[in-house]
Amino acid sequence: MRRKKEDTNETIRKLIDVARNYFTAQGYADTALEDIVHEAKLTRGAVYHHFGSKRGIFQAVLESVQKEVGERVEAEASRSDDAWEQLLLGCRAFVAAAVEPRNKRILLIDGPAVLGWEAWRMMDEQNSMRHLREQLHMMQRQGYVKPVSVDALTHLLSGALNEAVLWMAQLPDEKQSLEEIMPVISLLLEGFKLPRMTI
């Protein structure tokens, strides 16, 4: 029984990995299910069994990308012990990861178009927004953030970050656009900073 579960998980992982490569290179519309199953050395039946449709496997790929980005944000933020630096590192990690070629098309272009804006936002809320909300709650409890609604602040900052990556995705130089956007994000965050008492 355990072996069967491992085989199933391996099949799912292989299909997601192969599909991600195709969706990244060709986009959702130009990716044929036959190409995915052929390269994965599986059948269309395997896709239908595990994902239901091409849209279903795309949703699984998008979820995988969003989870990966969320984990990267968390890992980058944890490099510092300073709460404000954690927040800035996390924001930087999010915008940098979102515009990477292996993520950009799936996350920013096809994701909202294929699944719809509401479904895309719900997935974003379960990943990157969740990490952001947790960080802001912790910072507010520790006296770093002004006494405003953390939910409202989370949505405002998430919206700003998502809009920033949509702008960055259209520019030819990812590194330069990242260096342009980070001072703006930092300035925006400063507006919510509670001055710390010094002894």
Image (cartoon, rainbow, N blue to C red):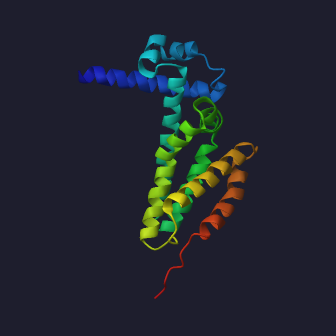
What quarter of the picture does the N terminus occupy? Answer: top left
On the image, the x and y values in percent for residue 11 come to: 41, 21
Q: Nearer the viewer, residue 147 or 72?
A: 147
Residue 168 visible:
yes
Q: Which residue is drawn at 44% across and 57% down?
A: 134
Q: In this picture, is 34 found above or below 9?
A: above
Q: Which residue is drawn at 61% across and 49% down?
A: 96
- Apparent side of residue 190 relative to residue 40 in the rendered image (left or right): right
User: Which residue is at the far left?
Assistant: 1
User: Which residue is at the far right?
Assistant: 172
Q: In which quarter of the image is residue 89?
A: bottom right
On the image, the x and y values in percent for residue 91 come to: 57, 56
Residue 79 visible:
no
Q: In this picture, is 123 found above or below 149?
A: above
- Apparent side of residue 165 relative to residue 10 in the rendered image (left or right): right
Q: Residue at x 64, y 61 (%)?
A: 185
How many marks the image carries: the answer is 0
Q: Residue at x 62, y 70 (%)?
A: 191
- Apparent side of residue 73 relative to residue 50 in the rendered image (left or right): right
On the image, the x and y values in percent for residue 9 come to: 36, 25
Q: Which of 179 and 28 is in front in this view?
A: 28
On the image, the x and y values in percent for residue 3 come to: 27, 21
